[in-house]
Image: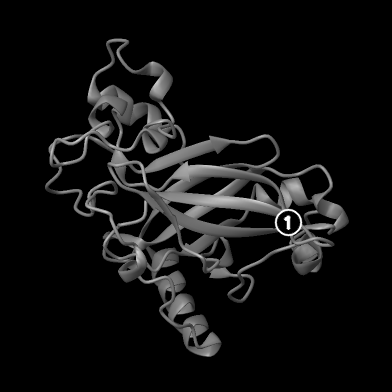
Amino acid sequence: MKNSKQLITTILTLTAVSFLTACGSSKNAVGTSDLSSRSTDTSTSSKPLAHCNQVTGTEISAKLKTYTDSSNTVRMDYVSVRLTALPSNFEESTTYIAMWKWLANSSGNTYLDSTALKFILVNPTNGQAITGWKNTLRWSDVSAIAKNMSYSDAATFFANVTFLVDLKDANGEYDVLKITNYSVSTNKAVSQADALLPLFYANPADYAYESSGVARAQVLQDLHPLKNYANQGFSASQFQSMTNNFCF
């Protein structure tokens, strides 16, 4: 609770300092009829929800967790991220990471917000931000911070810090976080990983349908972390327990 209060204070301070603007408005998300891909109310959902997720890409892997404020309210406009695997050359600072959000409607149409998401790095032991707001990150940006925290390599450092990502999506309209690794020399993507943003239905069979009963876009169903366990006799609460293993 103390860490949450400290972090809220840090967020407000850094936001004021960096003059953040409300970019990537959902007004641009034309064609989406699904505002329940991410459930915004844990108290009214009749189906168990996943508060955490994980994605394993070819070079980037990560875990995601809902952000809960000091009043124990899940904030849909933020998500906590921990990188669990990095590109092999990341410490050479020849690549950099950026994060994006996208959605899909029941017709299968997708929309990628063209504005890179802003984030800060947080020390989870005390809830304090250790960087300012950024929308790109290379190892050289944080290597001195890592050294001051007694971490000698990128993998160990990122295993012990958390990204707090500002989604600017209080209504939970966007479905997916995209983490992309870019070449510094070409600014072209060299690898990426897509993960469903929590909260979402823990049971992949529940997630397969929107609240209206219409089938959810297949591209989203395919991103459910437990899709390979569907129709194997697990209960919705068991699926929720499985997603809890993704938490950090």
Seen at 27% across and 42% down, the residue is 106
Query: Which amino acid type is marked by label 1?
Result: Lys
Seen at 46% across and 63% down, the residue is 113
From the top left corner, tell me how far across and down residue 150 is, in percent: 78, 58
Residue positioned most to the right: 92
Left or right: 115 as drawn, with respect to 180: left
Number of marks in the rendered image: 1
Kindly indicate the quadrant of the structure image that contains residue 135: bottom right
Q: Nearer the viewer, residue 166 or 247?
A: 166
Kindly indicate the quadrant of the structure image that contains residue 5: bottom left
User: Circle 1 sits on which residue?
Assistant: 188
Seen at 30% across and 33% down, the residue is 202
Q: How is the image coloured?
A: one colour
On screen, residue 238 above or below 151: above
From the top left corner, tell me how far across and down residue 34 is, in percent: 23, 50
Residue 124 in sight: no
Residue positioned most to the top: 232
On screen, residue 75 above or below 33: below
The N terminus lies in quadrant: bottom left
Kindly indicate the quadrant of the structure image that contains residue 138: bottom right
Seen at 26% across and 25% down, the residue is 205
From the top left corner, tell me how far across and down residue 79 is, in percent: 43, 57
Residue 202 in sight: yes
Left or right: 108 as drawn, with respect to 147: left
Q: Nearer the viewer, residue 115 or 152?
A: 115
Q: Nearer the viewer, residue 122 or 150?
A: 122
Q: Nearer the viewer, residue 215 or 89?
A: 215
Left or right: 85 as drawn, with respect to 154: left
From the top left corner, tell me how far across and down residue 164 is, in percent: 51, 62
Secondary element at tag 1: loop
Left or right: 67 as drawn, with respect to 179: left
